[in-house]
Amino acid sequence: MKDRHHNSAGSRSDAPSSPQRRGLLVGLAAGSLGLLPSGTQAAPAAAPSLAIPFYGPHQAGITTPQPYAGLVAAFDVLAENREELRQLFITLTARAEFLMHGGTPPQLDAALPPADSGVLGPIIKPEHLTVTVAVGASLFDGRFGLAALRPNQLVEMEDFPNDALNADLCHGDLMIQFCAETPEEVIHALRDVVKATPDLLAIKWKQEGFAATHGARSGPIGTGRNLLGFKDGTANADVRDDKLMNAYVWVQPDAGEPAWSVGGSYQVVRLVRNFVERWDRTPLSEQEAIFGRARNSGAPLGKADEFDDPGYPADPKGEKVPLDSHIRLANPRTPEATARLIRRGFNYSNGVSKSGQLDMGLLFVAFQSDLALGFIGTQNRLNGEPLEEYIKPFGGGYYFVLPGVAAPGGHLGQRLFADAASLPAPSPRAPAQAASKKG
């Protein structure tokens, strides 16, 4: 569950600086966007039974069922003014809608680069693909004159005591989360977006992940397990409960947030390495005390079933579930301290570290309507927990997921730009002033 720093100067040096080069790339992007002469438009998809609807009050990829593969990518925005930024969101809307619905990319002259990467073959058939777009605090600096419309709690993620944040793996003007049933599909979607936005976005960092599938062929998967072997997400709020989601996840009209943000949600991304070699040499009884659950069943210690109430009031001294166990600190289940968020995490495996250790861990993703009551409150309770000996957060950031697009013809961020119309245009030489950690 953790982050890194904004380094726009370095990232922007990779952007195309030549007007001719930029024009060529924009032209090629237009091909992939379907902005081509009649007769070369994308054909409608054939019965995309695994397609998740793009349109709605909220973006997909938050309360929709979690598929196997996930990928998060942070970007620097290269747009030079507010109108170019608006065009970026229009482009992202078009690409997300097409990718989630599916179809046949246009066939271009073989002398030109193809319109699509071809990773999924000649016809794109989405398998529960979702594309979820969020903005970072740095988007509300001096470049676009949007500072007055920044969500109240959207700041750069702070360092927590156990963090060792890598500046190259933190923050970003924009965050896009891709989820689907296969790794190929999320990679295809990322490449499509990168190709469609050569002059508007520069990728800053990314992380791929996978969800637990053990038992998928032999029986119900149930709650997934992390790479420490324990079930992860048992206490997640029920995403089918609209009342609960309105309370925990979606920003409401009376929240005191900017009007445009209603229906959106704060997103937390944390890259958390697991020291699996050390963990695998730790006695099982100690592992279970650290988590507060039995490893095999997932039940709270002293209980029989994974979803049993831990019964903290009857265990005030922590004789069954230790007071400093992960589940008890994360969610004490009291009116004053309840984890008001939903998680959508993935495991990751990045190869081998320079010291010859397995580089694997957790791609933590969480959504909440109130960052202080959600992730920050939860993480502050977890500071100093025994599990810290086995984990090290090293990247991620805080973002705000834009409200959904209600119907065709609209675009992501439409209300943001409508509200910005009454604000003064930024000075051409206005210095970029990233939102401070204190907001």
Image (spheres, helix red, strand yellow):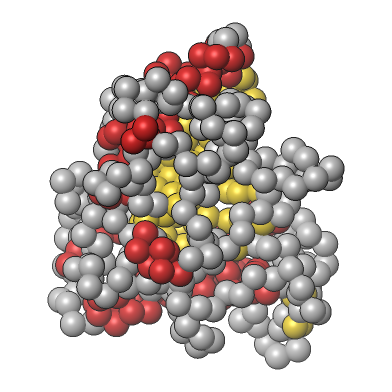
Residue 89 visible in this rendered orientation of the protein: no
Front residue (pair 222, 52): 222
Q: Residue at x 68, y 49 (%)?
A: 68
- 280 sits left or right of 371 in the view: right
Residue 280 location, quadrant: top right
Front residue (pair 272, 226): 226
Residue 270 location, quadrant: top left
Q: Residue at x 53, y 41 (%)?
A: 308
Front residue (pair 344, 237): 237
Front residue (pair 243, 409): 243
Q: Position of residue 191 (x, y in %)?
A: 63, 56
Q: Position of residue 327 (x, y in %)?
A: 43, 33
Q: Position of residue 99 (x, y in %)?
A: 65, 69
Q: Residue at x 27, y 75 (%)?
A: 253
Residue 57 visible in this rendered orientation of the protein: yes
The count of marks equals 0
Q: Position of residue 274 (x, y in %)?
A: 52, 24
Decide: is 130 above or below 183.
Answer: below
